[in-house]
Amino acid sequence: MSHHFGRRTGALAAAGLVAVALVACSPPSESGGGSTASGSAGGSDAKTATSAADLGGMEALVAAAKKEGALNVIALPPDWANYGEVIKGFSAKYPEIKVTSDQPDASSADEIATAKRLKGQSGAPDVFDLGAAVALANTDMFAKYKVATWDDVPADFKDADGTWINDYGGYMSIGYDSAKVPAPTSVADLLKADYKGKVALNGNPTEAGAAFAGVQMVAIAQGGSAGDLAKGVDFFKQLKGAGNFLPVDPTPATVESGQTPLVIDWDYLNASLSAKLPTWKVVVPKEAVVAGYYYQAVNADAPHPAAARLWQEYLYSDEGQNLWLKGGARPVRFDAMDKAGTLDKTAAEALPAVEGTPVVPTQADSDSGKKYLAENWANAVG
């Protein structure tokens, strides 16, 4: 699956959005106080830098990145978690660095495949933004790097060595056009006649992370679990039997045209549609609050290693984190920024309300769920 709205495969977070007590979880990087960048700023130095301090501090990192003059990003649709504004913000701050955004509608799996295919070439992706299943299966391709705000990120949301770090997340939700369908109060409501031919899932759950998490949400609501999806698949089979399941991959265009008046997807993707369609509402079902985060990493073979690291610094700065928040996603530094008073309060208050206990799917849930879907989804739902 490779369309704009559901670009991701395996968006199954090993970490969740539960408020985690902030703990100092890794020794801080050595201070770059007295060090200076060695002769060839950028180049091989940046490739091995595990923090800005390794290059002699942030100014040296910026200088090295400007010298490279380019950054390649991949699979970042402009409407996905506000990435269009994130790229604009980085470009405004560092106009000397030309950002090339490749394959905005690609999946996580496509990101890795592209990096392998273009290895050693100047057009290879410098950085990755991946669903958990794909990220955790490809850690050998990532360069260890710790951003300046590393200590703000709770231990469960990053690899202790700096190989990867969660960036933003959300909850599985039901988005619906309030002008076309009544407000669903629970997942079970979707079987009602009001929703005949109207219930769309963002992608095929055997390939797409958002759809997979949608089946997890339904399974939990029906008394199953994040790892036992039998009741979820059975519910979609019933939806299909009732004529309520709409086998159309939703996009912003299908939502605006009214073709997909109800969509099961991440809350930040559903929420972003309200700007285009004011009657579009979002609900996170309180009986099944499924959390998920994406993973950020630097390509170990990045053609622009300094720019790759500077991009990470921007993403995890207050500015970058607030831009994701403006896009309806919950940035990983949310709690720390809230405490420090640097969080965009207006954007935070606009997030869909969440009641109930968040379920944080584990890697074991992902593995057992994927196996069950591979064996049963096609026969039950098609």
Image: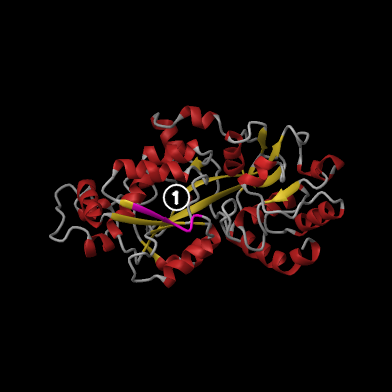
Looking at the picture, which amino acid does disc 1 mark?
Answer: Ala
Residue lying at the far front in this picture: please name it. Answer: 257
- Quarter of the image with the C terminus is bottom right
Residue 294: x and y in percent read 51, 52
Residue under the image location 73 percent in, 58 percent down: 229
Query: Seen in the image, is 216 located left or right of residue 17?
Result: right
Which of the 4 image quarters holds residue 238? bottom right
Residue under the image location 51 percent in, 64 percent down: 110
Instruction: For residue 247, say whether it is visible.
Output: yes
Q: Which residues are magenta?
A: 99-104
Q: Which residue is mark 1?
A: 155
- Asked if the magenta segment contains residue 102, the reply would be yes
Q: Of residues 248 and 127, which is closer to you in this image? A: 248
- Quarter of the image with the N terminus is bottom right
Residue under the image location 28 percent in, 53 percent down: 51
Residue under the image location 38 percent in, 71 percent down: 119
Q: Of residues 243 and 212, which is closer to you in this image? A: 243
Residue 90: x and y in percent read 35, 44
Q: Main secondary structure of the magenta part?
A: strand
From the viewer's perspective, is residue 182 above or below residue 70? above
Instruction: For residue 20, say whether it is visible.
Output: no
Q: Of residues 33 and 71, which is closer to you in this image? A: 71
From the viewer's perspective, is residue 35 above or below residue 279? below
- Asked if the magenta segment contains residue 290, the reply would be no
Residue 351: x and y in percent read 56, 34
